[in-house]
């Protein structure tokens, strides 16, 4: 089931591969831009309710249905307004015909996507993540099979968004059933009529989270959305081909963060010192996983691009070698953000994310105009490093001392040396390269005694906790 979870999380990469191979780089560029707009709107439709729901339900499970119903009601209203606005905007600008139909389908799927996010947050609050894994896997498989069939039949780019809508519908049905079963098991009170007072109170509490969602998603999506202003659609497709691989390699970050958010909230509420210590160890664990991925992808980028997309995407190789390093900073920053959320410093997090978004756009326009694809790739890495620096400095001064050097040095050196091994194995096939490089990395971690006995025990518990949630 753990492999099923990884397949579900990597579904976006599979869609990118299908679009790239069947429709070409220009269509992949259209897909990337429309999807970026759709994803940005999707995460905004719950208006930040996810974090409020997770925190509130983790503290009081008896109000699970109340939070689910009220958040769902406001999400439907907002998503319909977003969908109407997107269609109206489409009529005001000139767009290619194949992109126009894709936008219509994406707009129609916004309500279901928003409801999915709310349902996921409810299950995270009651710590039933295994249902989210199952729903994502089943929905992804059905959606991918449908997409493959439509592309074989000659369908255009709109088919990718129709398949995505089907994935969301299937996933929502499974998640909704899981919530109802949990309510029956716990004999929770059911109130199916939304309360305006509860909605208003939740919206006020969720405002900083909604803004943070806009800023964090904007940091990831706006670089794609603004690219048509700087590059041709084919170049946008080349960038997206590399970017999707980068996003897929970081699947461990949201899996761990969303699973451990209730634990963070409880630990910080009881002891800020223990919560900070747990966060530092989690940072070390994340960097231990991300560093070797970054080095190996950098070394083997050419083999990876050719394997996934085939010939014609050579320009994506150097882009991938650059943008993969943004994941190192995003992984570290995710821990900083959890520290800020758990210590009720959401407003400070929002202000720093605003600065990060402004820096991201400024760097993309400046470097993209001057250096094209490579300039955009460098801008993505620099902006993620800038945001991490802002958050880390704040956490160090106002939340808790961060053991950043201790968490970074030994995993980085071990990954660097294993990267040298990967360079020596470039003439061999990708399976041999990955296998021997992984063994080398484990050897260097043991050689440098990277983890203490307490850390090994904690990481073992975290791994068993994650595996147990995904396997149930």
Image: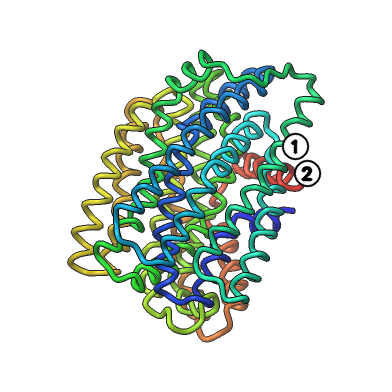
Residue tagged 2: 472
On the image, the x and y values in percent for residue 297 come to 47, 68
Q: Secondary structure at mark 2?
A: loop
Q: Is residue 373 left or right of residue 369?
A: right
Circle 2 packing at 10 Å, graded few (<14), some (14-19), many (20+), is few
State the residue in front, 74 or 108: 108
Residue 265 in the image, given as x and y percentages of width and height? 55, 25
- Can residue 324 be seen? no
206 over 279 or under it: above or below: above
86 or 30: which is nearer to us? 86
Disc 1 designates what residue? 177
For this orientation, the residue located farthest to the top is 197
In x, y percent, where is residue 238? 39, 72
- Drawn side of residue 366 relative to residue 153, left or right: left
Specify the quadrant of the image occupied by residue 445.
Answer: bottom right
Mark positioned earlier in the residue sequence (2 or 1): 1
Q: How many marks?
A: 2
Disc 1 crowd rating (10 Å Cα; few below 14, some 14-19, many 20+) is: few
Q: Give the distance between the C-alpha atoms of the residues marked 2 and 1, in whole angstroms.
A: 16 Å
Question: Image point 40% across, 65% down: which residue?
Answer: 30
Residue extending farthest right: 185
């Amino acid at each position: 089931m753990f492999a099923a979870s990884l397949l579900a999380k990597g579904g976006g990469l599979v869609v990118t591969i299908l679009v790239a191979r069947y429709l070409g780089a220009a269509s992949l560029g259209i897909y990337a831009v429309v999807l970026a707009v759709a994803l940005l709107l999707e995460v905004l439709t719950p208006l930040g309710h996810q974090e409020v729901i997770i925190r509130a339900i983790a503290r009081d499970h008896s109000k699970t249905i109340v939070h689910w119903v009220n958040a769902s009601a406001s999400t439907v209203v907002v998503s319909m307004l977003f969908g109407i606005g997107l269609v109206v905007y489409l009529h005001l600008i000139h767009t290619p015909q194949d992109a126009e139909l894709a936008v219509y389908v994406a707009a129609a799927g916004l309500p279901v996507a928003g409801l999915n996010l709310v349902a996921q947050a409810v299950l995270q609050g009651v710590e039933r993540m295994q249902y989210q894994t199952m729903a994502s896997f089943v929905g992804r498989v059905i959606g991918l099979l449908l997409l493959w069939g439509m592309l074989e039949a000659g369908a255009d780019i709109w088919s990718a968004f129709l398949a995505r809508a089907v994935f969301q519908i299937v996933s929502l049905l499974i998640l909704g059933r899981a919530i109802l079963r949990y309510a029956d098991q716990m004999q929770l009170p059911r109130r199916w009529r939304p309360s305006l007072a509860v909605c208003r109170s939740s919206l006020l509490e969720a405002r900083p989270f909604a803004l943070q969602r806009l800023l964090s998603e904007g940091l990831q999506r706006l670089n794609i959305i603004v690219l048509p202003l700087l590059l041709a659609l084919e170049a946008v497709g080349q960038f997206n081909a590399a970017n999707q691989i980068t996003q897929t390699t970081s699947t461990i970050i949201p899996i761990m963060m969303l699973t451990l958010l209730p634990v963070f909230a409880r630990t910080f509420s009881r002891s800020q010192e223990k919560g900070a210590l747990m966060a530092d160890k989690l940072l070390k664990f994340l960097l231990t996983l991300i560093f070797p991925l970054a080095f190996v992808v950098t070394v083997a980028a050419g083999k990876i691009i050719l394997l996934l997309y085939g010939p014609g995407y050579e320009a994506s190789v150097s882009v991938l070698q650059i943008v993969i390093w943004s994941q190192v900073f995003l992984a570290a920053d995710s821990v900083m953000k959890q520290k800020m959320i758990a210590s009720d410093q959401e407003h400070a997090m929002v202000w720093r994310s605003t600065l990060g978004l402004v820096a991201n756009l400024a760097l993309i326009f400046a470097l993209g105009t001057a250096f094209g694809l490579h300039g955009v790739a460098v801008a993505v890495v620099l902006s993620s490093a800038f945001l991490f620096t802002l958050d880390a400095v704040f956490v160090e001064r106002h939340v808790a001392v961060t053991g950043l050097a201790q968490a970074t040095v030994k995993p980085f050196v071990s990954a660097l040396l294993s990267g040298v091994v990967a360079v020596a194995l470039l003439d061999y096939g990708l399976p041999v390269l990955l296998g021997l490089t992984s063994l080398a990395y484990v050897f260097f971690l043991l050689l440098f005694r990277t983890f203490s006995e307490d850390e090994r025990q904690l990481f073992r518990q975290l791994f068993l906790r994650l595996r147990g949630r995904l396997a149930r």
